[in-house]
Amino acid sequence: MTAGRAADERPSTGSEPRTPSLHQLHLFVALAEELHFSRAAARLFITQSALSQQIKDLEGRLGLKLFTRTSRAVTLTTPGQVLLTDARAAVAAVDRLRRNAETHTRRLSGRLVVGSIGAEAAMPHTRAVLRLLHDRHPQIHVEVRSLNFIDHVDALIQQEVDVVFLRPPVPAGIEVQHLVTEPRVACLPTGDPLAGQEQITLAQLAHRPVIDVPPEAPRVWWKFWAVDPRPDHTPVRYGPIASDMEGLLHLVAQNKGMCFLPAAARDFFPRPGVRYVDVTDLSPSTSALAWLRTNRAEPVVEAVRRAAMSFSTGANSRESPADRTGAGP
């Protein structure tokens, strides 16, 4: 029986095994994680038939059957399970090589890749910092990328961006320069009885579910934005998951839950079915520029850091003492 199974897992190729391409290994890992051709193809942005053909060619190159396919299920064979660890390591190593090469290329060419979450790229303070950077270093080319809840920190850690304009808190290993402080507000469905009030308290929101974010997003960040824990230790009940602002606002409008956002959301994210309400006992939020601690001395990072510091110093000097509400948590 063992010999028969081994024979079944070695496709007849008529030739010696050949080296698989990195692209094929990437497809193999995706299919091994999804165990569903349609879902894996959608994840990879290719057709199901193209994925099937590439996997068939990969099996031929390796001389091994990697998957068992039936009309109901896709499963990894024993050789497939063994090779998955090496395939993941190979894909990760090449991705790391690519990211490092891109990072060095950016630094040599004077290119700064800036990440932004939500509407941070359009905020007056962001535009002021980048304008100051351009005035001081017109040779630096700035590219701005929009990031979602998951990748706004991960892209920084993976060095796919050099800095990010975001809303703290942030995980360890990341430094920030606080730029401005503003209140947070409750984002409620228009049908909520509290949506018609001008001001409310956290206690009034105690039993309303809060929209959650994917588990890959930094938990320390979202617990702050969910106000978890609450001052009175009321447990926070989480609702459905959203991975970006549009998804979050859609869920609120569909009465699936509520959330807390910067007060600027009133201007940047007006949506049908959504109402923003002031919360009298809610701590403020801050906008900040973030970078990896290990990259703080890189020339382009240092240049934008100094621009942010100059803006922050100037903004603070323009505030009266009563206006300085602090940097928040």
Image: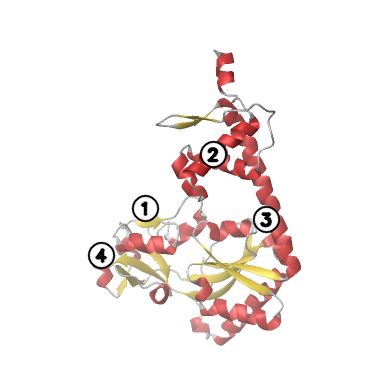
Tell me how far mark 3 sits from mark 4, CA to CA.
Answer: 46 Å
State the residue position of label 1: 240
Residue extending farthest top: 1
Tell me how far mark 1 sits from mark 2, CA to CA.
Answer: 37 Å
| Amino acid bearing label 2 | Gln
> Vertically, is 194 above or below 315?
above
Closer to the N terminus: mark 3 or mark 4?
Answer: 3
Closer to the N terminus: mark 1 or mark 2?
Answer: 2
Disc nearest the viewer among 1 and 4: 1
Marks 3/4 in contact by CB < 8 Å: the verdict is no
- The answer to which image quadrant residue 252 occupies is bottom left
Secondary structure category for the residue under label 4:
loop
Q: Which mark is residue 192?
A: 4
Q: Position of residue 10 (x, y in %)?
A: 60, 24
Task: Say which of 200 and 2 sits in front.
Answer: 2
Marks 3/2 in contact by CB < 8 Å: the verdict is no
Q: Is residue 8 left or right of residue 141?
A: left
| Amino acid bearing label 3 | Arg
Tell me how far mark 1 sits from mark 4, CA to CA.
Answer: 17 Å
Q: Which mark is residue 99?
A: 3
Closer to the N terminus: mark 3 or mark 1?
Answer: 3
Disc nearest the viewer among 3 and 2: 2
Marks 1/2 in contact by CB < 8 Å: the verdict is no
